[in-house]
Amino acid sequence: MKEEFTTSARRWYDKDPVLSSAMKTLEESDDETQIKVALNLIKIITEHNIHDSEYESVEDIVSATEDVMESSKRDRWYDLDGTLRTAISLLQNCPDSTRHIIAKEMAQNVLELIKKEDDDEEDEISEENPEN
């Protein structure tokens, strides 16, 4: 029997393929990369929400997110770190159109950080084993 795919998503971020892919890559990243991406996400989301007049200040954004965070469960992979949890909650509460734009930026950011880490590791290896 052939497996059938449905349009219903298991998780809120699986509705957007770009966001789903970025979240999967982020989940599989090391802790340091996750925190860097989370901090960038908070910055990007804050800028988008204030620019789009969704909220008037950072305090409004944080307040709206805290309400959702208190009522949500805490057993997801991104709940282990407060910064990451805040960033993902902010993302979850964005309007769909804003979330899609941010998802593209997030995906690019995740890939850039992973590439930079790979390049740094290669530099360390070449420094440890210089060819004469």
Image: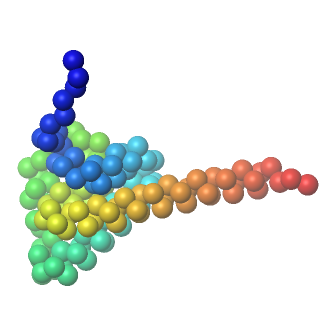
Q: Residue furthest top?
A: 1
**Residue 81: in sight, yes or no?**
no
In the image, residue 84 lies at what x, y percent?
30, 55
**Residue 8: in sight, yes or no?**
yes
In the image, residue 7 lies at what x, y percent?
14, 42
- Compared with residue 90, is residue 59 higher up or lower down, i.e. above or below? below
In the image, residue 105 lies at what x, y percent?
34, 66
Q: Which residue is painted at 91% across and 55% down in the image?
A: 132
Q: Quadrant of the N terminus?
A: top left
Q: In which image quadrant can residue 58 be found?
A: bottom left
Seen from the viewer's position, the closer of residues 15 and 35 is 15
Side of 7 relative to 112 (left or right): left
- Compared with residue 78, is residue 58 higher up or lower down, i.e. above or below? below
Q: In which image quadrant can residue 53 be found?
A: bottom left
Seen from the viewer's position, the closer of residues 21 and 45 is 21
Side of 113 relative to 118 (left or right): left
